[in-house]
Image (cartoon, rainbow, N blue to C red):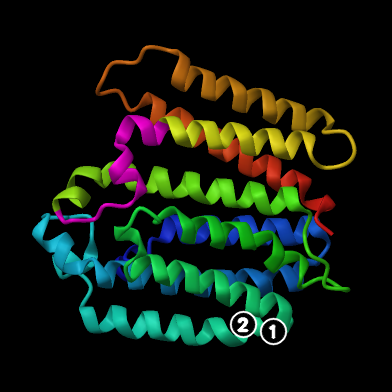
């Protein structure tokens, strides 16, 4: 369990679930969607373990008791072996979905590893997230018969959601990151501006998913759009106490509704 926690299990399974759901919606079928999900999971696990391996000394210095590698609950060698096995498995699993989808997924994984290995410390820290999440719809559609590219709105929405994920993921550790010399985009912006930017990007992504695809949004889509707007309004229009975590929680809930809107639009990917 500790080894899985060191791989950032929550985000890893979340990305895997989103990609698998998109594949099902796009018509890949259950066996093909499960195969694509296995490729996504192997890549996410490799990125997660590499992240904690790279950050181990920093996490030890910061006294991070929530990091199994920093506390010694997971030996460094075990995490290295796990990351290597996951990355090795990612290659054939990705290519089993067709070389176009496979290469695209491996590029997305390379973006995540680039973030781990140094981009996270720069002002361009958002780019690997934008690249990798933006490519997710392509990984799905290029595995379909005829290997179509996804519509532009799906790629754009994925990229926006990736930047939101980056901002949200960094918020709890901003002070520790700055102390360790990690000066990515969220650390430079600060908590308030990072939350505000995440909210704006979520609003843009929701608007794209509602208005850009051909055909009506549908009742469920309109409901999700309304809920997203309400959550973002509550997060940023209300005067919350300075230490309140409500804006972050509301923004996270809005991100969930936007992801649901993206999955709901999955039938229009191909």
Residue assigned mark 2: 93
Q: Quadrant of residue 138?
A: bottom right
Q: Is residue 245 visible?
A: yes
Indicate whether residue 185 is drawn in magenta.
Answer: yes
- Other-residue count near label 1 (Cα within 10 Å), few / some / many at <14 / 14–19 / ≥20: some
Q: Is residue 4 visible?
A: no
Q: Is residue 127 magenta?
A: no
Magenta stretch in the rendered image: 180-195
Name the side, left or right, on which 243 lies relative to 199.
left
Q: Mainly helix, strand or loop, the magenta region? A: helix
Residue placed furthest toward the front: 123
Report which residue position mark 1 lands on.
96
* Residue 134 - label: none
Residue 46 image position (x, y, % from top left): 43, 74
Q: Mark 1: which secondary structure? A: loop
Q: Quadrant of residue 214?
A: top right
């Amino acid at each position: 369990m500790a080894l899985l926690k060191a791989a950032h299990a929550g985000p890893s399974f979340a990305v895997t679930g989103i990609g698998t759901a998109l594949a099902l919606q796009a018509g890949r079928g259950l066996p093909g969607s499960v195969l694509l999900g296995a490729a996504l999971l192997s890549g996410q696990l490799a990125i997660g373990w590499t992240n904690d391996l790279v950050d181990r000394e920093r996490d030890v210095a910061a006294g991070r008791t929530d990091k199994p590698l920093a506390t010694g609950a997971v030996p460094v060698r075990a995490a290295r072996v796990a990351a290597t096995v996951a990355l090795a498995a990612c290659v054939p699993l990705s290519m089993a979905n067709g070389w176009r989808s496979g290469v695209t997924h491996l590029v997305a994984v390379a973006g995540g590893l680039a973030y781990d290995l140094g981009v996270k410390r720069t002002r361009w820290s958002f780019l690997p997230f934008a690249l990798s999440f933006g490519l997710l719809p392509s990984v799905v559609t290029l595995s379909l018969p005829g290997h179509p590219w996804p519509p532009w709105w799906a790629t754009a929405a994925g990229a926006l959601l990736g930047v939101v994920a980056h901002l949200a993921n960094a918020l709890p550790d901003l002070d520790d990151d700055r102390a360790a010399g990690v000066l990515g985009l969220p650390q430079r912006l600060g908590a308030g501006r990072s939350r505000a930017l995440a909210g704006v990007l979520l609003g843009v992504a929701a608007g794209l998913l509602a208005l850009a695809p051909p055909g009506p949004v549908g009742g469920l889509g309109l409901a999700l759009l309304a809920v997203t707007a309400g959550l973002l309004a509550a997060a940023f229009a209300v005067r919350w106490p300075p230490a309140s975590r409500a804006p972050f929680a509301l923004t996270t809930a809005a991100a969930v509704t936007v992801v649901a809107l993206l999955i709901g639009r999955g039938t229009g990917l191909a």
